[in-house]
Image (cartoon, helix red, strand yellow):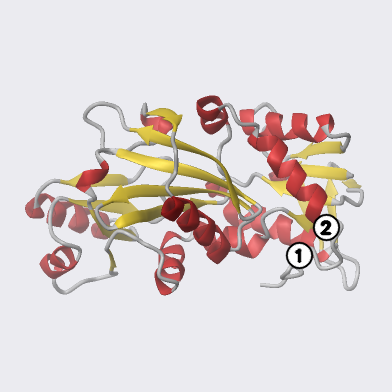
Amino acid sequence: MKIAILSRNENLYSTRRLKEACIARGHEVDVIDTLHCYMDITSSRPAVRYHGEELPKYDAIIPRIGASITFYGTAVARQFEMMGTFNVNESVAISRSRDKLRSLQLLSRKGIGLPRTGFASKPDNIKDLIKNVGGAPLVIKLLEGTQGIGVVLAETSKAAESIIEAFMGLKANILVQEFVKEAGGADIRCLVVGGRVVAAMKRQGAEGEFRSNLHRGGSAELVKLTKEERETAVNAAKIMGLNFCGVDLLRSHNGPMVMEVNSSPGLEGIEVATGYDVANKVVEFIEKNAASTNANKTKGKG
């Protein structure tokens, strides 16, 4: 097959591993810088152009679209979908997962375990907003934050009020979320491919750090999932409509709680921690699904 990886940098670990997996399984593969694509939106004949030439017909694309280019990246992915190219993660699913508030609303509607969460634009009573999620300590998150940036732990109600007022003064969209103390600064990243958890790692925050992101100095190790954790990760991916994603869970007294569903998960941390070849699983999924006559469920709509 002919496969394109939409990535801004072909030297990134995840992009390189996916390219290697495609080649190892006998496929042609191109790495295409998403921001250098431009679209020919012509009646009945959509096309994508790149460096002055129309791109060839690809059997499948693997979108590696960073949060900072979600709008343009999903537009490019949607253009490929309208051309009949199989997309590992469809554009509408990527957009859905990137909106943290929308994600939580969809997951909660389907009964997925979540930390109690509040969202408001201009609450008349900040104290009530804090009380509604269980009081301090609590976590305050910027909706647009990534890799742990824009996530603050407020130890007291007074601190929470000050932080919320400061963010609102900057007209920032924020979530106020219960702090799951029993998680002990750790979470579990599950890599889901094609409706199956193919790898899982436990991420532990650095000493004195409640955020477990590896970018924040956290460590990672192989972890054995419970049946409930595995089912929660698979169901969360399904609700988001993602075929390849990272689902972040917290272990709480009330069972697994989903923190986030990541549509462009990094492979380095989990492949190193677990020793599993996740990139190969992604290419296997493409081989099994790209030839379907109804490969893209949305057909580029929406």
Q: Between residue 28 and residue 110, name the one nearer to us.
A: 110
- Quadrant in which the C terminus is drawn: bottom right
Q: Secondary structure at mark 1?
A: loop
User: Whole-percent x and y of residue 202?
Assistant: 41, 36
| Amino acid type at mark 1 | Asn
Please tell me which residue is depicted at 35% across the width and 53% down the height of the picture: 142
Distance from disc 1 to disc 2, alpha carbons, whole Å, reads 8 Å
Q: Is residue 198 above or below residue 41?
A: above
- Residue 10 vertical position relative to residue 95 in the rendered view, above or below: above
As rendered, which of 242 and 13 lies closer to the eye? 242
Is tag 1's residue or tag 2's residue first in the polypeptide sequence? 2
**Residue shown at 53%/33% (left/top)?**
270
Res 85 label: 2
Task: State the residue position of label 1.
Answer: 296
**Residue 156 percent location from the top left of the image:** 9, 50
Residue 107: percent from left, percent from top: 44, 66
| Residue 171 at least partly seen | no
Q: Is residue 263 above or below residue 218?
A: below
Q: Amino acid under label 2? A: Thr
